[in-house]
């Protein structure tokens, strides 16, 4: 017999079940979810847990509560945000492809902007962060160092929207490290590219910075997709 879900995690469990059902199309756009009481009974939870889960779905724009018309499923591809995907329990291949395609495009442009906009302090910090990647002792440390370098690069670009996008993927990137070990599995063979990018940013050379990051991000994307 399965162990009961701990009380504190019941709303999380209900939320995860419903979110997955919407993302995977078991509930279609425009479809009305069961009333809260029926939903709670179906999922064998109390009304408070069902209500909290629905509130979180509404915050992510996965559903819309219409007074007098219940809770309707939205087309998350049109109304949702990145958090709707990064909170998923699994990491499937199409999502990985799209994530790393977007990551590469964002980081390449961030590198160009950073070479023009960075402060002296940010330039020095990027050199130190590149050294941290090179000196990381294992894949876990290298993954954290990679995140710190890329986050520093985006911050140096001075684009608030870029920073918010990076914030959206932080939980996925760091808390599911086992799913992303291929990103840094090349180890020392790619570490020179971090240093090359940091040096180009410090030298105010946008194209050299973009080229180094493009080469690095493309190699990482290929590793994740093999």
Image (cartoon, grey):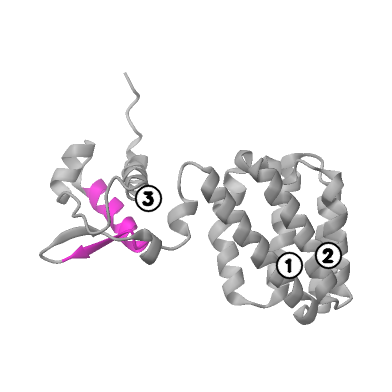
Q: Is residue 145 visible?
A: no
Mark 2 or mark 1: whose residue is earlier in sequence: 1
Name the mark on residue 153.
1
The residue that mark 3 highlights is 23
* Image quadrant in which the N terminus is located: top left
Point out residue 145 in the picture as x, y percentages from the top left corner: 75, 52
Point out residue 179 in the picture as x, y percentages from the top left corner: 60, 40
Figure check: 20 above or below 70: above
Query: Please, which residue is most extreme toward the left here?
Result: 68
- Magenta stretch bounds: 48-66
* Image quadrant in which the C terminus is located: top right
Q: Residue at x 19, y 44 (%)?
A: 39
At numbered mark 3, what does the secondary structure look like: helix, strand or loop?
helix
Is disc 2 surrounded by few (<14), some (14 to 19) or many (20+) residues within 10 Å? many
Viewer-nearest of labels 1 and 3? 3
Is residue 126 a member of the stretch shown in magenta?
A: no
Report the Cα–Cα distance between label 1 and label 3.
32 Å
Is residue 65 a member of the stretch shown in magenta?
A: yes
Is disc 1 surrounded by few (<14), some (14 to 19) or many (20+) residues within 10 Å? many
Magenta: main secondary structure equals helix
Report the Cα–Cα distance between label 2 and label 3.
37 Å
Look at the numbered discs 2 and 3 and tell me whether their residues touch, using CB distance below 8 Å: no
At numbered mark 2, what does the secondary structure look like: helix, strand or loop?
helix
Given residues 81 and 3, the one toward you in this image is 81
Given residues 47 and 169, the one toward you in this image is 169
Look at the numbered discs 2 and 1 and tell me whether their residues touch, using CB distance below 8 Å: yes
Name the mark on residue 100.
none
Q: Residue at x 53, y 61 (%)?
A: 168
Mark 1 or mark 3: whose residue is earlier in sequence: 3
The residue that mark 2 highlights is 197
At numbered mark 1, what does the secondary structure look like: helix, strand or loop?
helix
Q: Residue at x 51, y 43 (%)?
A: 92
């Amino acid at each position: 017999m399965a162990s009961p879900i701990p009380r504190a995690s019941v709303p999380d469990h209900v939320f995860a079940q419903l979110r997955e059902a919407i993302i995977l199309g078991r509930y279609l756009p425009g479809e009305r979810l069961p009333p809260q009481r029926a939903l709670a009974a179906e999922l064998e939870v109390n009304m408070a847990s069902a209500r909290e889960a629905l509130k979180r779905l509404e915050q992510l724009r996965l559903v819309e509560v219409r007074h007098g018309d219940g809770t309707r499923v939205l087309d998350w591809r049109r109304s949702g945000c990145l958090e709707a995907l990064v909170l998923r329990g699994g990491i499937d291949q199409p999502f990985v492809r799209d994530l790393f395609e977007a990551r590469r495009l964002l980081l390449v442009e961030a590198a160009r902007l950073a070479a023009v906009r960075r402060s002296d302090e940010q330039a020095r910090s990027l050199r130190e962060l590149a050294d941290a990647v090179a000196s990381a002792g294992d894949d876990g440390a290298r993954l954290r160092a990679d995140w710190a370098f890329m986050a520093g690069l985006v911050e140096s670009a001075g684009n608030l929207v870029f920073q918010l996008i990076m914030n959206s993927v932080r939980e996925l990137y760091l808390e599911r490290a086992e799913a992303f070990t291929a990103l840094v599995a090349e180890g020392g063979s790619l570490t020179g590219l971090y240093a090359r990018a940091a040096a180009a940013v410090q030298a105010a050379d946008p194209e050299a910075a973009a080229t180094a990051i493009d080469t690095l991000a493309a190699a990482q994307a290929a590793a994740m997709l093999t």
